[in-house]
Amino acid sequence: MTREQKKNLDNLWKQAVFKKYGKVCSWCGKDKYVQVHHMITRSNYALRWDVRNGVPLCRGHHFYTAHVDYQEFTDWFARKRPRDFAYIMIKRHSQTKGDYLAIKLYLEQQIEELDREVK
């Protein structure tokens, strides 16, 4: 997969995560400087573009909670989204890279489904 394809999928994934969970910090509710955090690192291609692996966070909670106090953040995520937590803990051991077109279609479908739910 090319660097450009990865960047395209990263952008689609970010859109899908914001549509599913909102563009507000899941930790504190702030709506400024919101970013998307990967619960399991982006280097894990089995989860890199899985919407359940994304958490919207303000810049402060992204860098000073999620990346500094990983255990506290993981415990919080497990309480906040227990089904997603269980899913990604199992799936993280699968290291498949995946197919660009299949992942792109999955993300576009996720965005379409979430758009329909909002309407």
Image (spheres, rainbow, N blue to C red):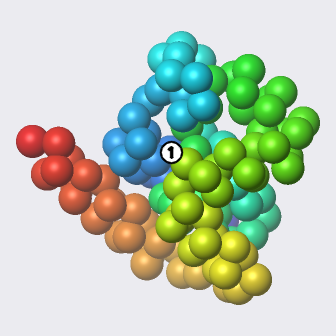
Task: For the N terminus, give its image quadrant.
Answer: bottom right
Front-most of residues 78 and 50: 78
Residue 100 versus residue 3 in the image, above or below: below
When asked about the image quadrant of residue 93, the answer is: bottom right
**Farthest right residue in view:** 68
**Farthest left residue in view:** 119
How far across and down, in percent of the image, does residue 91 sit?
A: 65, 80
Q: Is residue 17 left or right of residue 63?
A: left
Q: How many marks?
A: 1
How far across and down, in percent of the image, does residue 9 sit?
A: 52, 57
Q: Check disc 1 and report its element: helix, strand or loop.
A: helix
Task: For the C terminus, give its image quadrant.
Answer: top left
Residue 63 versus residue 15 in the image, above or below: above
When asked about the image quadrant of residue 97, the answer is: bottom right
Residue 107 versus residue 119 in the image, above or below: below
Q: How many other residues sit within 10 Å of disc 1, few (<14), some (14-19) or many (≥20)?
A: many
The three-letter amino acid code for the residue at tag 1 is Lys
How far across and down, in percent of the image, does residue 27 sit?
A: 60, 31
Residue indicated by mark 1 = 14
Residue 11 versus residue 43 in the image, above or below: above
Residue at 47%, 26% in the rendered image: 24
Residue at 46%, 47% in the rendered image: 17
Residue at 53%, 55% in the rendered image: 81
| Residue 100 visible within the image | yes
